[in-house]
Each structure stands twice: as structure tokens, then as C-alpha cells.
Amino acid sequence: MKKTGKCILVCAGDMGEEEILYKEGDFLIAVDGGLKHLARRGLVPDYILGDFDSLGEEDLPLLEAFREKHPGGVTTLPVEKDDTDTLAAARLGLERGFSRFVIYGGLGGKRIDHTLANIQTLVFLKKQGASALLTGGGTDLFVLSGESVTFERGFEGTFSLFALDPEVRGVAIRGMKYPLENGTLISSFPLGVSNHISPESQGSVSVGEGMALAVLVRERNCSN
Amino acid sequence: MKKTGKCILVCAGDMGEEEILYKEGDFLIAVDGGLKHLARRGLVPDYILGDFDSLGEEDLPLLEAFREKHPGGVTTLPVEKDDTDTLAAARLGLERGFSRFVIYGGLGGKRIDHTLANIQTLVFLKKQGASALLTGGGTDLFVLSGESVTFERGFEGTFSLFALDPEVRGVAIRGMKYPLENGTLISSFPLGVSNHISPESQGSVSVGEGMALAVLVRERNCSN
């Protein structure tokens, strides 16, 4: 049975003071050290999952308190495993019937390997028929395939689209500085990088065949 | 004619105090705002290329001084263009006969779109038969396809390998915590993330068919 709420994964990466947008009916998973982000915001997760190798000593009492109250709500993953903690959390959300995912704390800053692994999780979720957003620091990443998205009016920033397959066909970019109709993206050529969306226009993007990664960067982050 | 030196691209992204390793015979290109990184290190580029939209007012005299001395050594690119500045610099290096590239200042920190565009430049260069390294802050990225690499002994950190094609076959990972023989990577599954290389072992990786992105993170950067 499909759930109407979102599955929210909160990972251990840097989050600063960023707000976690949570609504009644959402399923909130603390992914490993992501528990500390929830604790600092006074949010109680519905589930905790991880190998807990990135949890600080000061965060362990949080984990123990949760484990006591919800003995079935904690999964300790082995440190040595094929899935990343985030992918394991994505699988859990799918099993629970969720088809919309938001990942916080998953843009690794200096840990580009973590960011790339989380982009793979976006691809994994898309292949399972779910939609997923990887968000942090004014940057949103999501995968598009055989679909169109229209951005909210008033958004100002840059939009980039990267091919995740060797070829991505039927690409249309509208309402931006550099429009494109029926374009083809390839993975070795950065067509569609840093397209500007002004607050007066309403940007939209369509992707036909193949998977593409969309990256939205809000204006305040656009200076290098 | 193949050149024996390297083509070094210095981009505008954050570099901190990082050293630029330059040898006689290398071809040093300042890519747009990357000029300021060279100036701060007392290095004079062989070529300057960019739309100069990310160059600060205080850096413009540098550009003018260089332009006066080397009138043929500056290319001003249009702000509106298909290639990124970095890709244009890569093309220039290829035209000059270089087959080895190192990109500094190209790991965008918060600008994930820049990082991803530069990863595409690595793919572009590999497809042209060149090797390329994207390096910064203790992290090295490079593309592997139909080849083997052995890391220097004494290296400590993590190694990750991501599929850049839908399937990457014939993957062998040796001398690391989680070895792999004749493995297949797919782009939706983060197999091979954060494998540990200890200083006593000598890590190596082979990739058969398809392209994979290797990410090496030095130990000092491994905490989140």
C-alpha cells in the first residue's frame, strides 16, 4: 500500500542550522550520525538505522534512550556491508510503502564520495519508481527520467542537468536563460551547466529517455 | 606530437593553502578566477582562459599585466557558451598535444554542479585518450576504463569506485579492506564506497569494460 507521506532520511553530513521540513504522516529515519541533527532540532525519529560508526560519544545516550522506548525501531547494521547506511534506509522506506523520499545531511561537503554514493541512492530510488530529493545548503539534487518538472515561481538561482546514462534524449529546458528543445545530453559533455533562473520566469525541465541528474542551486550560494 | 609534461588547469574553486605541483615542461593554464590562486603562489601561467566572470576586481590588474606581456596567451570566452571554462581549457591542452591533465580548484565545495561538470571533463578527456586527475583538499578523482592502477605504498585513506556507465565489468580491487575480483558495478548501487587502504598494504584497482570514477580520500579528511 502506497503511503501519502514522505520518507525523510536524515544522514550524518554537515547540516548547519538547516530546517528539516517534517509533516504529520511522514516517516522520519535517523541514518546513523544523522540522529544528532534530529536531537538538536528536538525531533524524534520514527526509526534509527546505521552502523553507528559516525555517532559521537555524546550522542550514544540519545540512541540508548530511543532504543529503550522503541525496541523495534532500531536496526544496527554491520560496519562491513555492501549497502551504504543511506541505501539501507531507502530500502526500509520502500518496504514501508513510501514512494517519496527526502534526504538531508547527505551532501558530503568535502566528502565527495559520500555525495556521489547518495546520488546513486537517488538513482536506485528512481529505478524503484520512487521520487527522491537530496537537499542541503540551498542545493537540491534529483533524478529525472520520462517526466517534466516545473519550478516554483520566484525561485532564483542556477539549474544544471547532467546525463546519468551515456545518452539522455528529449531534453527540454524552458523559462531559463539558455533554453533547449529536444536536446540530447551525453555524460562527457557539460551541456546544461549553470543555467540561470530569474524570479520573474518560471523554469521547467523535461527529460525523455534516459536518466538525468538535476541540480538546483539557490542564488545566495551561486558565488564560488 | 605528444608532450611529455602535464597540462595543469587551475580553476576558481576554493584551494585553501594547497600546493600546485608544477614541473619544467608542464603547461599551466589559469582557468578564469583560477588566476588568483596562481598569483598567490607566485606562479605565472602559460595561458589564461575564461569569461572572467568570477575574477574579483582586485585580480583584474593581474590579468591586464599578463595580457600585455603575452598578447597571444589570453583567450576571453563568451559568458554564454556551451563549454564550461574548464572544458575549453581541456580542449586547449589537447590541441597543444598534452595527454596528461591535472585539475586544481575544480572541486566546488558547496557548488556540487561545478564538481559534477568537472567530473564530466574527466570523462571527456578519458574519451580523448588522455588521463586526468581532479584534485583538492586531500581528495583525488580520476576515471578508469580498461586499465589498472596501483597506489603508492604508505597511502592511508578510503577508496570508492562509481560506475559512470550503466554497467562496469571486470572490476578488481586489491590490497584494501574489502577486496573484489571480477566484479560488476552498476550506477544505482554504491558497491565499492569507502573501502579502506592502510599504509602497510598497497592498494590497486582494475577496471575492464565501461568507465568508472575513482575517488581517493586521504585519512585526514575521512571524518565527516
Image (cartoon, coloured by chain):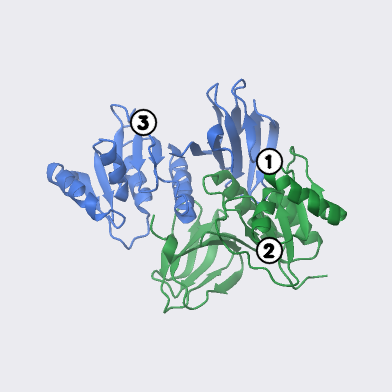
Chain colours: A green, B blue
Residue A126: horizontal and vertical position, in percent?
A: 67, 61
- Earlier in the chain: of badge 1 and badge 3, it is 3
Taking the spot 44% from the left edge, 48% from the top edge, the residue there is: B118
Taking the spot 75% from the left edge, 40% from the top edge, the residue there is: A81
Residue pushed farthest right? A71
Out of B85 and B53, give the one closest to the viewer. B53
Residue pushed farthest left? B68
Is A61 left, or right, of B6 in this rendering? Answer: right
Residue B28: horizontal and vertical position, in percent?
A: 29, 37
When the figure is inspected, residue B105 is found, relative to residue B51, above or below; the finding is above
> Which quadrant would residue A43 be assigned to in this image?
bottom right
Chain of the residue on which disc 3 is drawn: B
Dot 2: within a 10 Å radius of its alpha carbon, few (fewer than 14), some, or many (20 or more) residues?
A: many
Residue A101: which disc? 2
What is the three-letter code of the residue carrying label 2? Answer: Phe
Residue B21: which disc? 3
Out of B17 and B28, give the one closest to the viewer. B17
Dot 1: within a 10 Å radius of its alpha carbon, few (fewer than 14), some, or many (20 or more) residues?
A: some
Quarter of the image containing the N terminus of chain A?
Answer: bottom right
Dot 3: within a 10 Å radius of its alpha carbon, few (fewer than 14), some, or many (20 or more) residues?
A: few
What element does badge 2 sit on?
A: strand
Is B72 left, or right, of A112 in this rendering? Answer: left
Residue A146: horizontal and vertical position, in percent?
A: 61, 68
Query: Same chain, marks 1 and 3?
Result: yes
Residue B7: horizontal and vertical position, in percent?
A: 34, 36
Residue B184: which disc? 1
